[in-house]
Image (tube, rainbow, N blue to C red):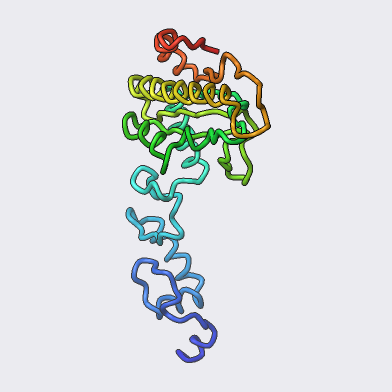
Amino acid sequence: QQQQQQQQNPLNDHEWPSLGGHTSKDKSQALSDPRSCQSGAASVAASSTPHVPPTWGVSSVSKENSPSLQPHAQRTSVKSVAAKERNARGSLWCHLFISPEMLRPGFDLNKKIIGKGGCHTRGIYEATGAKIRLRGHGSGHLERDGQEAPASLMLAITVETGEAAQFCEAIRMAVELLQGIARRFRSFCRRGGSSEVGRGQPPSATLFWIGELSHRGKLCAAALAEDLGLPLP
């Protein structure tokens, strides 16, 4: 009779989920005797602390004690709230637009901005913690899509930690770097350059300017911009 019951119930013992320590004999009786099924269901319902397998009891597990079992939508919502809180504190970024005329062949604008081995931009980062990146048309910097950003040539300054003093110092150092490059470009133009392209054309009076600022960045850098003689956008 036991062999016949095993043939009718092809599941092995290890294939049964644990339901509070029932034996294989109990399982067989539960399948063959409806009354035992009813009594067993009643006993499980009456138990104050039933054993619930992890894969069956997700809804009964406390979300506070098991955050990994929270719904995906709720976890995403928490991340979205955290992102909004960071944005609410105010991001600090500034885009110094650079005149494309300084891309004149022979002047090597990008190399002069970045510096040998990245020494210029890295020096600003090491001093202030600000991220410095040459972006836009003519920058040579490729975005994730493999193309230059569809924007004006710029030196982008970003401070993620929200330190206003570091942000202003990064702007000051970047402006001083561009001021020195602008002087070299004017000298380059007076010499006629090393190419027929642009020869005899005097440089513009303004070779770089503050093109864009975040709202908080504008509040932080207003006094500095006035000292540097750069109007805010």
Residue that appears at 60% across and 17% down? 204
Residue that appears at 38% across and 24% down? 173
Asked if residue 75 is positioned above or below residue 91 in the image, the reply reads: below
Taking the image as shown, residue 11 lies to the left or right of residue 103, namely left
Residue that appears at 56% across and 25% down? 191
Between residues 13 and 218, which one lies in front from this camera angle?
218
Asked if residue 117 is positioned above or below residue 155 in the image, the reply reads: below
- In the image, residue 83 lies at what x, y percent? 46, 32
Give the position of the C terminus as an image quadrant: top right
- In the image, residue 32 lies at what x, y percent? 51, 78
Between residues 115 and 209, which one lies in front from this camera angle?
115
Taking the image as shown, residue 135 lies to the left or right of residue 172, namely right
Between residues 157 and 40, which one lies in front from this camera angle?
157
Between residues 132 and 100, which one lies in front from this camera angle?
100
- In the image, residue 87 lies at what x, y percent? 46, 26
Q: Name which quarter of the figure residue 136 lies in.
A: top right
- In the image, residue 127 lies at what x, y percent? 31, 30
Q: Name which quarter of the figure residue 55 lies in.
A: bottom left
Asked if residue 48 is positioned above or below residue 140 in the image, the reply reads: below
Q: Name which quarter of the figure residue 165 lies in.
A: top left
Residue that appears at 44% across and 53% down? 58
